[in-house]
Image (tube, rainbow, N blue to C red):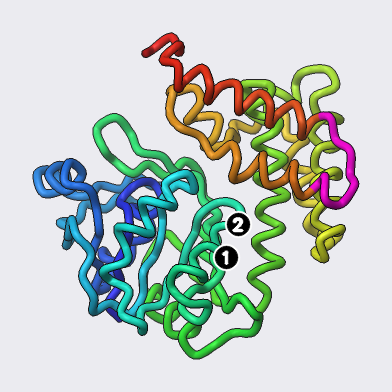
Amino acid sequence: MRVLVLGAGALGGYFGGRLAQAGGDVTFLVRPARAARLANVGLRIDSPFGPAHIAPQMVTQAVPGFDLCLLACKAYDLDSAIATLRPAADGRMAILPVLNGLSHVARLQAEFGAGQVLGGLARIQATIAPDGTVRQLNDWRWLSFGEWQGGVSERAHAIAAAFAPAIGMVAEAVPDIRQRMWEKLVHLGTAGICTVLMRAAVGEIARSEGGTAFMRGVLRANAAIAAAHGHPMPDAFMAQYDALFSDSTSLYATSMLRDIEAGLDAEVEHILGFLADAAARASIDSAAHRLALLHGRAYLQRRAALRLPAQ
């Protein structure tokens, strides 16, 4: 299977790098500056599952001939990613997006055809270090995917088989990818609202009086939003994340918080905005959702005005 990975950042660099390390036919579609750096020092992965140092195959312009594209950009880069990817869309290449949120799937289906786009999600904590190393921050390592209409197809099985030899990751074809994506959104939306509003990791919030109750309240509001849109959260899911948001030792923080603290663009509309809109459509009133969205939008306004401390 020939795999094109759009982006060699935290997600694309990790999953694509692990596949390349295992001997997979992987080509990274990257910007010229990233290509120059990777050509100079290679793709490095620092991980609890062992390091990797890869000399990656790369292109800076999309070309056809691939079986699968792993779309691993940030949600706010979707427009430019679509334009970049279009020359590779030959009608047979499947597109597996692992962007946060849900709204990108309909957009990709409209651009490339409903049959070419799978649902997908990544459950991993990773970041790019200042020297360009992809650094995995804990043992989360899951890549899940499936047909948008449900079921597990032959191509989903083939994708899982292609990734199976890769160490440090679990690639799973699932029959209910939309439910899985809503579950991730409930989890990520809770973590995003709480860590961004409080500018703190989960453990720091939990150690603060009222912090655990606040996080659990946001979790339940997000579960209610998902249920109102046809995707109730299983009891086991709620128990798992009740425990996660009660862990006073946790260093867990979202990439949205890391981006804000670094003065970068952030997936405010794609996560916080989507959830706030979904809550409104379901007539669910949540002050935390409105406040987090306002907070994120105000940050982006300040960033656009070049008024951040580092600007």
Please give the name of the residue rendered at 25% of the width and 58% of the height, measured from the top-left corner: 29
In the picture, measured across the screen, residue 240 lies left or right of residue 83, that is right
Q: Position of residue 238 (x, y in %)?
A: 82, 52
Q: Are marks 1 and 2 in contact (CB under 8 Å)?
A: yes
Would residue 71 be visible to someone looking at this image?
Answer: yes
Please give the name of the residue rendered at 51% of the width and 51% of the height, measured from the top-left corner: 124
Q: Position of residue 45 (x, y in %)?
A: 31, 48
Badge 2: few (under 14), some or many (20 or more) residues near its Cα, within 10 Å?
Answer: few
Q: Is residue 282 magenta?
A: yes
Residue under circle 2? 103
Q: Is residue 37 magenta?
A: no
Q: Which residues are magenta?
A: 279-287
Would residue 17 be visible to someone looking at this image?
Answer: no
Please give the name of the residue rendered at 23% of the width and 75% of the height, measured from the top-left corner: 64
Q: Position of residue 143 (x, y in %)?
A: 51, 64
Q: Quadrant of the C terminus?
A: top left
Q: Quadrant of the N terminus?
A: bottom left
User: Vertically, is 265 above or below 183?
Assistant: above
Residue under circle 1? 106
User: Vertically, is 210 above or below 14?
Assistant: above
